[in-house]
Amino acid sequence: MLVGAVLIIAAFYMFIRFFPSFSKSEKNELRTQKNEHGGTEFVRCPLCSTPLAKSENMISKIYRPMNTPDQRMTVSGCPHCYPVVKAGLQRKCPVCGKTVPTEGYLIARLFNRTTGKKHVMITGCTECYKKS
Ligand SMILES: [Zn+2]
Ligand SMILES: [Zn+2]
């Protein structure tokens, strides 16, 4: 009994420590994905880095044509940071590190791999592209 309780508490602390956003009472199961090394990681919003629940989707647009090996894609954000940024969150570009306004977005390339897997590479944001 006692050992079991200690284990549960330890596991709970680990969880809080590694996933602070979990404490905000999110009942939804979080989305996970396999990384390059075969490990499991959380799917996070590339703008505000909030782990996304299975019911939450990124607000993104994919530009045609659909049949090219890489397509242009824009990412406006996730339900946590678009259209309204939740308190305590910041929309930051993973490329330039600048704050991306809500009317701005990330620009990405979507690769359709031959294995059927899609791979997204973020190339910048509206702020990056302003300068160049
Ligand atoms: Zn977000
Ligand atoms: Zn940027």
Image (cartoon, helix red, strand yellow):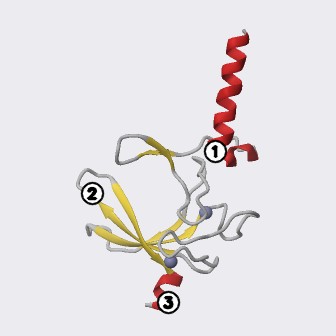
Whole-percent x, y for residue 55 in the image: 60, 49
Query: Of helix, strand and loop, which one carries label 1?
Result: loop
Query: Of helix, strand and loop, which one carries label 3?
Result: helix
Q: Nearer the viewer, residue 98 or 104?
A: 98
Mark 1 neighbour density, 10 Å: few (under 14) some (14–19) many (20 or more): few
The mark that comes first in sequence, 1 or 2, is 1
Looking at the rendered structure, the kind of residue marked 3 is Lys
Whole-percent x, y for residue 16 in the image: 69, 40
The mark that comes first in sequence, 2 or 3, is 2
- Residue beneath the point at 58% across and 59% down: 49
In whole angstroms, how far apart are the C-alphas of marks 1 and 2?
31 Å
Q: Nearer the viewer, residue 19 or 25?
A: 19
Q: Which residue in the rendered view is the most extreme toward the left?
A: 114
* Residue highlighted by disc 3: 130
51 to the left or right of 116: right
Whole-percent x, y for residue 65 in the image: 32, 73
* Residue highlighted by disc 2: 113
* Residue highlighted by disc 1: 19
